[in-house]
């Protein structure tokens, strides 16, 4: 039996090798042959999910809520101590030094990532900016959003915090942080398709990674040194309710 494991594309590039290390170790610990899928964009991710059976997905909580409601998935685990935070940044020499400097009609660049967008919009409520007040420049990657910002093609850009802080020193020197979220209670989750009935060996292997030196090394590569914790059905329902609150 071969299963497909898809990793949502919103992770820092230096984590790429870590996901392959994780895949290799999970195969070893679970005895299941796992095919790793690492789409480069949200569009490619959607195409992969439509084109083939994806048994397991590591995804942001907003998209995960949709997958649970509409695609027959359940949340089984999430990383401990690794919340999803986002950065709103401006070009360093643009004269925009605070959120208050962003006005209706401004252009914001961002990768196609719904959770980052919704958190960012919540932060912009403090300066009375709504989604309809903004011209959105959606890019394939966060790196492309940074290039747009530095070229002056956008007034600000949204980033997943981990990705922002992983950008090159040269890139970071040309931008400045206007605000960084500190929500703490939103994180990516691991989803398993309800039709994948033999998922327990995989889940057990994932949750026990921290119990071995080999597993700890992989978790360090992923920036998840505390490992994963299990999620109940109630945890999944709470996550969906929280996403609905942010959408309201």
Image: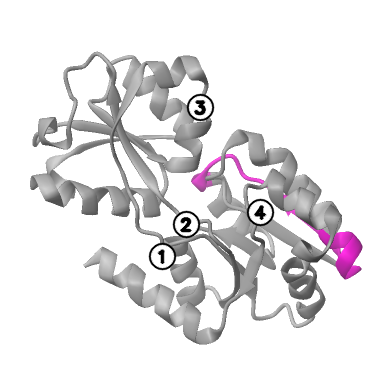
Query: Which residue bears the numbered disc 3?
Result: 167
Which numbered disc, 3 or 2, marks the residue that appears first in the sequence?
2
Query: Which residue bears the numbered disc 1?
Result: 185
- State if disc 2 and disc 3 touch (CB < 8 Å): no
Residue at disc 4, secondary structure: loop
The residue nearer to you, when weighing 176 against 145, is: 176
Residue at disc 1, secondary structure: loop
* Left or right of residue 35, residue 157 in this image: left
Q: Looking at the figure, which quarter contains the C terminus?
A: bottom left
Across and down, in percent, residue 246 comes to: 27, 64
The residue nearer to you, when weighing 81 against 139, is: 81
Which numbered disc, 1 or 4, marks the residue that appears first in the sequence?
1
Separation of disc 2 and disc 4 at Cα?
Answer: 13 Å
Separation of disc 1 and disc 3 at Cα?
Answer: 25 Å
Separation of disc 1 and disc 4 at Cα?
Answer: 17 Å
Across and down, in percent, residue 93 comes to: 24, 13
Kindly tell me whether residue 108 is visible in this rendering: yes
Point out the stretch of residues depicted in magenta.
26-43
Separation of disc 3 and disc 4 at Cα?
Answer: 21 Å
Q: Is 61 rendered above or below residue 244?
A: above
Query: Which residue bears the numbered disc 2?
Result: 83
Q: Which residue sits furthest bottom?
A: 234
- State if disc 1 and disc 2 touch (CB < 8 Å): yes
Separation of disc 2 and disc 1 at Cα?
Answer: 6 Å
Across and down, in percent, residue 139 comes to: 41, 33
């Amino acid at each position: 039996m071969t299963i497909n494991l898809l990793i949502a594309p919103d992770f820092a590039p230096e984590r790429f090798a870590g996901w392959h290390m994780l895949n290799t170790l999970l195969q070893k610990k679970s005895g299941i042959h796992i095919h790793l899928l690492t789409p480069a964009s949200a569009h490619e991710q959607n195409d992969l999910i439509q084109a083939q059976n994806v048994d397991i997905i590591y995804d942001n909580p907003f998209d995960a809520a949709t997958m649970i409601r509409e695609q027959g998935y359940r949340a089984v685990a999430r990383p401990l101590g690794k919340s999803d935070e986002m950065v709103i940044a401006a070009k360093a020499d643009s004269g925009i030094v605070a959120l208050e400097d962003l006005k209706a009609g401004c252009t914001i660049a961002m990768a196609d990532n719904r959770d980052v967008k919704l958190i960012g919009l919540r932060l912009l409520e403090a300066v009375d900016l709504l989604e309809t007040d903004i011209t959105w420049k959606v890019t394939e990657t966060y790196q492309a959003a940074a290039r747009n910002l530095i070229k002056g093609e956008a007034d600000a850009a949204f980033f997943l915090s981990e990705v922002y802080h992983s950008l090159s020193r040269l890139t970071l020197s040309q931008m400045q942080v206007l605000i960084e979220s500190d929500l703490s209670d939103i994180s990516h989750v691991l989803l398993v398709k309800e039709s994948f009935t033999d998922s327990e060996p995989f889940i057990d292997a994932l949750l026990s990674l921290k119990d071995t030196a080999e597993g700890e090394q992989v978790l360090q590569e992923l920036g998840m040194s505390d490992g994963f914790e299990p999620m109940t059905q109630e945890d999944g329902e709470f996550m969906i309710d929280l996403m609905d609150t942010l959408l309201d």
